[in-house]
């Protein structure tokens, strides 16, 4: 039994509706906007404090607004294309016009991350600024967007957890409120599940964010690449851990996703989130070691 299981709270996925035109503004969109705007303001203030960087900031504060534009394009295009290619290639190959419907959801963090990397490198090359310095600043504020984004995943709701076998859980609506078939975590025969979205918000957003800011206060910005490496390692490990409690993506299994099926390496049973996190952890470790030796 799950004595602390609670029904999913009745939260509308729409934050509000614009009067007159009836256009709904979803929490999901507001999470992205809030993360980007707060990140923009914080990075501007970091660039205005050269002492944090050991005497010279990577770029002038006035360039941060231009960087934001590049980041928005990178995260939206990368996140959407990552979801299409990694999770539902068969569906979108049959329905290509659906790819542009970003407002209906369907974004992949690892795709968004690759999009940001490409956009950031192009920005740095165009303006002749330090790529590692800019990356450290972006890594410092990225957990803010992750925190808001995971909370929005919970509100939607999507990306729910596996049936719980611990005293707590959430009874999600819709298809996930199914019979447990003998699983211990149930209330009146209905599955109570791990609120894995909130686990990710806590680890990827709050815990990782506090760690990065503590390192920044200790002078980590003077070692280019250190914060970026810690972010990559921290996110990869947090994501791989929470995947143990998260319902596996149905799109990842079987011939409907040949890429995902091939990446399973036989019957290892790794999720797509875990597989995509491995190179992040390895790249982060390499960056940390390299920055620490400088």
Image: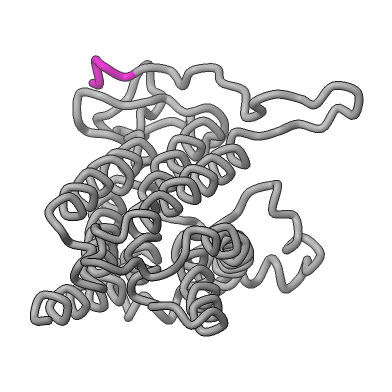
Name the quarter where the C terminus is drawn. bottom left
Q: Pinpoint residue 40: horizontal percent, then vertical percent.
A: 50, 51
Residue 290 x %, y %: 16, 82
Q: Nearer the viewer, residue 254 or 117?
A: 117
Residue drawn at x 60%, y 63% is 66
Question: Hey, which residue is sitting farthest left in the picture?
Answer: 293
Is 236 positioned to the left or the right of 151 in the image? left
Q: Quarter holding the N terminus?
A: top left
Give the quarter of the image for residue 276.
bottom left
In the drawing, does residue 282 fall left or right of residue 81?
left
* Residue 213 sits inside the magenta stretch: no
Vertical relation: 236 (above or below) 142: below
Between 213 and 233, the one lying in front of the other is 213
Q: How is the image coloured?
A: one colour
Q: Which residues are magenta?
A: 1-5
Q: Residue at x 36, y 60 (%)?
A: 137
Question: Which residue corresponds to the image point at 49% horizontal and 40% vertical from the top-left?
Answer: 153
* Residue 171 falls in image quadrant: top left
Magenta part, dominant SS: loop
Is 66 left or right of 261, judged from the image as shown? right
Is residue 88 visible to us here?
A: no
As drawn, the residue found furthest toward the right would be 20
Q: Is residue 294 visible?
A: yes
Q: Is residue 12 above or below residue 136?
A: above
180 in relation to 262, above or below: above
82 left or right of 247?
A: right
Across and down, in percent, residue 270 comes to: 31, 67
Observer-nearest of 175 and 63: 63
User: Residue at image x 49%, y 78%?
Assistant: 124
Residue 4 lies in the magenta-colored region: yes
């Amino acid at each position: 039994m799950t004595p602390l299981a609670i029904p999913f709270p009745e939260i509308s996925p729409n934050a509000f509706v614009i009067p007159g035109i009836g256009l709904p503004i979803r929490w999901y969109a507001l999470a992205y906007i809030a993360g980007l705007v707060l990140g923009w303001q914080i990075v501007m203030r970091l660039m205005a404090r050269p002492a944090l960087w050991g005497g010279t900031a990577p770029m002038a504060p006035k360039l941060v607004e231009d960087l934001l534009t590049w980041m928005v394009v990178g995260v939206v295009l990368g996140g959407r294309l990552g979801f299409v290619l990694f999770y539902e290639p068969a569906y979108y190959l049959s329905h290509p016009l659906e790819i542009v419907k970003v407002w209906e959801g369907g974004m992949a963090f690892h795709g968004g991350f690759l999009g940001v990397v490409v956009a950031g490198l192009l920005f740095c090359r165009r303006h002749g600024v330090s790529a590692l310095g800019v990356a450290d600043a972006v890594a410092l504020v990225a957990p803010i967007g992750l925190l808001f984004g995971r909370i929005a995943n919970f509100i939607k709701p999507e990306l729910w957890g596996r049936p719980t076998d611990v005293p707590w859980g959430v009874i999600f609506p819709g298809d996930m409120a199914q019979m447990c078939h003998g699983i211990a975590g149930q209330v009146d025969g209905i599955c109570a599940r791990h609120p894995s979205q909130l686990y990710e918000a806590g680890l990827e957003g709050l815990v990782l964010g506090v760690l990065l800011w503590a390192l920044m206060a200790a002078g980590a910005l003077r070692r280019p690449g250190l914060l970026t490496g810690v972010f990559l390692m921290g996110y990869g490990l947090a994501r791989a851990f929470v995947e143990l409690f998260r319902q596996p993506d149905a799109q990842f299994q079987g011939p409907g996703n040949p890429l995902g099926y091939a990446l399973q390496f036989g019957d290892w049973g790794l999720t797509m989130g875990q597989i995509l996190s491995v190179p992040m952890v390895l790249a982060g470790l390499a960056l940390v070691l390299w920055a620490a030796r400088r």
